[in-house]
């Protein structure tokens, strides 16, 4: 896979960093969305939802309503076609349904069409735009790598449009977050974090194909501290969305 071009600018017009946020509509993802929109140095180019730790239709609907609440319905919102190997348990996937009942969102109605816009097309378009404008895109993933690696495995040249990745995929030397009560112990293990376990092959692809710090900035936080890791380290427990936003 080609290296990120050193000639690309780190920021876009006005010194703002172009960012695409790929998430799976859990509560922490919407907290991160609020923070990203509030950050003056971030130009949020698009939001892509993954059918992972959510139910797609209510996830898209509540994301649309959150954007209206933030007065940012202009941010492109789309649904990824990615699928993982190990689905999240259904009891985990209800945050988006619960959030839809939040009183502050009741004045707003979803504007997402049926079928929803393609997250794959949105990501391809943003990467092509980043290459053409020579303003690299920061890819923030608080879900599996799959929505990104699905695209890059078919079109590896689009990697030149990426300036930085920030991935919520666990931390180092801590237990994972697979609950044996919700995950069959025959396939679960004590080390995996769900965003890696959902599609470990996508993680392997990403870490093998983005070996340099200039291409991968995987920053992880858990209660014992904040980790910036190099590709190839084992992954562990979860991440605070406030620190993910701060990594940008």
Image: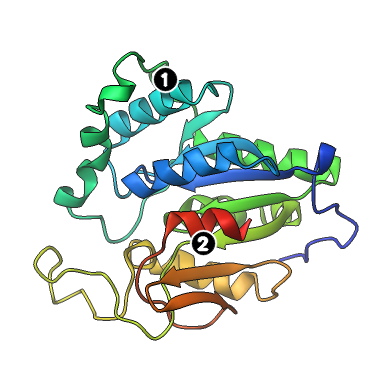
Per the image, label 1 sits on a secondary structure element best described as loop
Asked whether disc 1 touches disc 2, contact meaning CB atoms under 8 Å apart, the reply is: no
Horizontal and vertical percent position of residue 11: 79, 48
Q: Where 173 sits versus 140, above or below?
A: below
Q: Nearer the viewer, residue 187 or 24?
A: 24
On the image, numbered disc 1 is attached to which residue?
112
Tell me if I can see residue 191 in this picture: yes
Its colouring scheme is: rainbow
Residue 167's disc is: 2
Q: Quadrant of residue 143?
A: bottom left
Per the image, label 2 sits on a secondary structure element best described as strand
User: Between disc 1 and disc 2, whose residue precedes?
Assistant: 1
Horizontal and vertical percent position of residue 168: 46, 62
Q: Residue at x 33, y 34 (%)?
A: 59
Horizontal and vertical percent position of residue 227: 52, 76
Total numbered circles: 2
Query: With 39 as the anchor, is 93 left or right in this view?
Result: left
């Amino acid at each position: 896979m080609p290296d990120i071009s050193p000639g690309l600018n780190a920021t876009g017009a006005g010194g703002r960093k172009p960012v695409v946020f790929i998430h799976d509509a859990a509560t922490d993802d919407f907290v991160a969305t609020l923070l990203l929109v509030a950050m003056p140095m971030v130009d949020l180019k698009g939001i892509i939802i993954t059918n992972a730790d959510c139910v797609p239709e209510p996830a898209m609907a509540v994301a649309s309503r959150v954007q209206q609440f933030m007065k940012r319905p202009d941010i492109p919102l789309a649904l990824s076609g990615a699928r993982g190997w190990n689905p999240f348990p259904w009891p985990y996937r209800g945050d988006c349904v619960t959030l839809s009942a939040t009183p502050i969102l009741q004045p707003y109605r979803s504007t997402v069409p049926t079928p929803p816009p393609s997250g794959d097309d949105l990501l391809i378009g943003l990467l092509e735009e980043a290459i053409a404008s020579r303003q690299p895109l920061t890819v923030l993933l608080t879900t599996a790598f799959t929505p990104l690696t699905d695209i890059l495995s078919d079109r590896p040249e689009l990697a030149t449009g990426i300036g930085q990745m920030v991935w919520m995929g666990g931390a180092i030397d801590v237990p994972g977050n697979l609950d044996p009560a919700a995950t069959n112990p025959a396939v679960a293990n004590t080390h995996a974090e769900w965003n890696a376990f959902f599609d470990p092959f996508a993680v392997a692809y990403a870490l093998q194909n983005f070996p340099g710090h200039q291409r991968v900035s995987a920053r992880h936080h858990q209660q014992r501290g904040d980790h910036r890791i190099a590709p190839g380290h084992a992954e562990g427990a979860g991440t605070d969305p406030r620190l993910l936003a701060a990594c940008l």
